[in-house]
Every structure is written in C-alpha cells, then in structure tokens.
Image: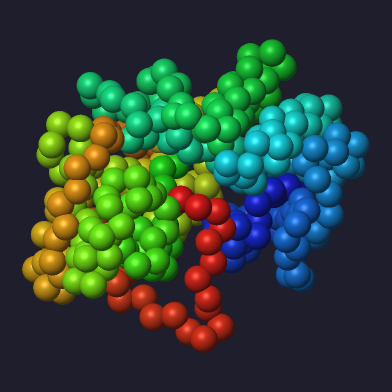
Amino acid sequence: MRLLVTGITGKVGSNFLPAFLKAEKFAGWSIRAICNNRIIDHPGVEVVRASLSDAAAMRAAMDGVTHVLHMAAVKETPALAMDVGVKGMFNLLEAFRATAGTRQFVLLSGDCTVGHAFQHYDAPITEAAPRRAYPGCYALTKVLEEVMLEQYGIQYGTNGCCLRAPWIVEKDDFRYALSFVDQFGGPAWSQLLSTQDVERHARSASVPLLHDARGVPLRRNFIHVDDLVGAILAALDNPAAAGQLFNIAMDEPVDYGQVAQYLRDTRSLPTAEISTPFHSNWLDNAKARLLLGWKPQVDLQDLVDRAWDYVRAPDDPRIIWYPG
C-alpha cells in the first residue's frame, strides 16, 4: 500500500506522520508527500516537490498510490485558496480516478462548511445538515471540496471519505485562543471590544466568557489534534468509511461559561464577559463513533489543562500555521 499525503508539514500532518508510522495497522505501507513551499526531511517519506495546481505533476505523483489523504488548505488568500482547494482537489481526484489500483481518497474538511458560529441551527449539526458556509474564500473552497468528493463518488464510483473537523488545537493553542495579549484565532477582540477594554483585560489576565446571540455562554466546537489523528487512522482503509462524511469533534462543544468557571476554580483567573453576535452550535459526532469505532479522548477539562500546563522548550517556538 502507498499513501499519498498533502499538508504533511502542517499542524495535523506533523502529528499524523509519527502516529501513522507507529501504527501496526499500516506496517509495510509506504508514504509519499506532495510539498510545495514547506519541505519535510524524513527517511520514511518520499517527497514530491510540486504545486497541487499542476495537473501533470499530480498524475505523476499518483503512480503506484493506493490511498490519498488530502489535508492541505489555505485560509483567506483567494488565489492560493483556489489553487489548493479547487484546482488542487480537482487535479488530485482526476489523477486518482485515472490511476489503476487506487482504493480510497480521504479529505480533511472543516466545520466552516456548515458555518460553525456564524450560522444558527435548531438542533445538533449532523452530516445530513445542509452546507451553509460563512463569508470568505476558505469556507467556500471547503464546501467545493466536499461537493467534488461527493460527486466523484456519484459520477465515477470513487471511494471517498470526508472527515469534517472544527477548530483544531494542540499544545498551548487553546490558552492563546483565550488570550488578550497574543491571541491565536478568532474572533479578533478588536471586533468586539474597544482597545481600552482589551488592554484592561490583558492586564488582569482575564479569561473571556463569550456570550452568544441569545445572551448565554457561547458553545463552540473544537477538536484536539491527537483525537483528529486518531479519527484519520480509524478511517484509513476502513470499509465502514466508504463514501461517508463524518463529523470529527469533541463529544460536547466547548462551553465558554464552563471554561471560565473551571479556570476561576483551578487557577484563580478572573472573567471578562463579552457579548457576541455568534451562535452556539453542536457538531454531532455520533456517526463517527458508531461506524468508525472512534471516540475523542480529550474533554473540556483536559483541553484546558493541557493548554495551561504546556511548557515550551527553547527549540519549540509557537508556529501559527494559519490564523484560526
């Protein structure tokens, strides 16, 4: 078996590779990575230096491949987002279906396709919910990727599997997502607060307690990268994943009220209550639990403790793979 991977140098890819190489299930598999701007140097990985927008290069890279894991993504840079999310996806799928012996195409998508906090849902969001992206080219490309994968299954019988993840965090990401000093991700405090309020909360080391459009603590979906990697490994070469879309999220969305209370109780951190126009949503992971036998290991308290207890070594700088 040969696995072709895109996005191997990113947050998910850099965690996926050691887990894949260690997994007994994939002993004897070889791995090939398509890299463009960032290159990996690993004895267990064959590197193809190419852009996903190069159709001929994708056909060549697919030679001898049985499985594809497409994780590469670009945020709000329209030209690059189209190259990766539209041209790249099309080129990979075309090469995949034209190559003898290919078995499975796995796409890593995101809850931007259902609008996460920007869209209102009356019930938990299942895989049957309509796609309702929020504004921006990133969410649009993810919708198009999901639809392309789905349609290739209908048109050509391609065996595709889509894993739809919310905000992916590792190490101390979650701590910085709640920071008024060096914020990681969004919403940007400048969109919700005055400069004076941001500075005041930063001085007091306050924890933001976001309220949703109804005025109650916001609930937003997250997934720890370890749990997402576990889901990818569970889906790869799994007959139960054939033609399926799975929500890969924590069992419950993160409740900002519970986070604030937990940090008050355990670390004596004050709370800054903030009104937002966002909606609380619940990404239902029941299908993945049932069909893949997967379940997340990181709950809310573990998510917080991991982020606050993490101590960076001098050779472990914070890397922002992309904002949010």
Whole-percent x, y for residue 153 in the image: 64, 20
Residue at 40%, 30% in the rendered image: 115
Q: Find residue 167 and report its horizontal and vertical position in percent.
A: 41, 47
| Relative depth, front residue between 184 and 155 | 184
Going 50% across and 52% down the picture, which residue do you hit? 323
Numbered marks: total: 0
Q: Is residue 312 positioned above or below 204 on the image?
A: below
Image spot of residue 66 (x, y percent)? 74, 41
Q: Residue at x 81, y 58 (%)?
A: 47
Q: Residue furthest bottom?
A: 314
Q: Quadrant of residue 44?
A: bottom right
In this view of the protein, can residue 116 be seen by the observer? yes
- x, y percentage for residue 159? 64, 27
- Residue at image location 34% in from the left, 45% down from the top: 191
Is residue 294 visible in the rendered image? The answer is no
Q: Nearer the viewer, residue 95 or 222?
A: 222
Q: Would residue 291 appear left or right of 305 to someone viewing this image?
A: right
Query: Please, which colouring scheme is shown?
Result: rainbow
Q: Nearer the viewer, residue 38 or 34?
A: 38
Residue 180: image quadrant is: bottom left
115 lies left or right of 136: left
